[in-house]
Image: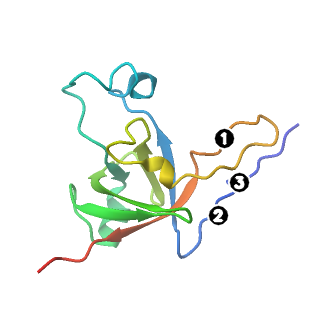
Amino acid sequence: MIAHSPPVDLLTEEFPIRLTTGRRLDSCNTGVQSGGFPSPLRQGEILDLCPEDARALGVEPDELVRISSRRGEIMAPVRLDTRLKPGLAFMTFPFPDEVDVNVLTIEATCPVAGTAEYQAAAIRVEKLPVEV
């Protein structure tokens, strides 16, 4: 029997949200097959947040935010997703020329399977200052 191990990148007060990465319907095969073609589904890279987290951060849909991890930071607009639980965020990784989400991810691997733990990064989401 194999015991469950939590993600290596622990949540803290500084990095309180768990970012998971994956694919959306419009990014088949990491975008290699679909990236060079226009799609009515393609919206550009976004950070999906649950409405409760967005409200607590004071951010609105389509607002550009700073997303930071212990490894780096990027900026992306917010989209609300009622399917996400508070404390969980989602982004895709197939379009690094648009938003390089992998700047945030961790290089830890599972000691049993040897697979990367890139889908469990601790992040902070920050509202950007209003320019005057």
Identified by mark 3, the residue type is Pro
Q: CA–CA distance between discs 2 and 3? A: 8 Å
Above-or-below relation of 44 to 35: below
Dot 1 amino acid type? Ala
- Amino acid bearing label 2: Leu
Nearest the viewer among 8 and 4 is: 8
Quadrant in which the N terminus is drawn: top right
On the image, numbered disc 1 is attached to which residue? Answer: 116
Which is in the foreground here, disc 1 or disc 3? 1
Q: How crowded is mark 3: few (under 14 residues within 10 Å), some or many (20 or more)?
A: few
Residue ID at (65%, 49%)? 107
Distance from Cα at disc 1 to Cα at disc 2: 16 Å
Relative to 93, say whether 73 is above or below. Answer: below
Quadrant where the image shows the C terminus:
bottom left
The answer to whether the residue labelled 2 contacts the one labelled 3, judged by CB atoms less than 8 Å apart, is yes
| x, y percent for residue 117 | 64, 45
Using residue 40 as the reference point, say whether residue 89 is left or right of it: right
Pointer 1 or 2: first along the chain: 2
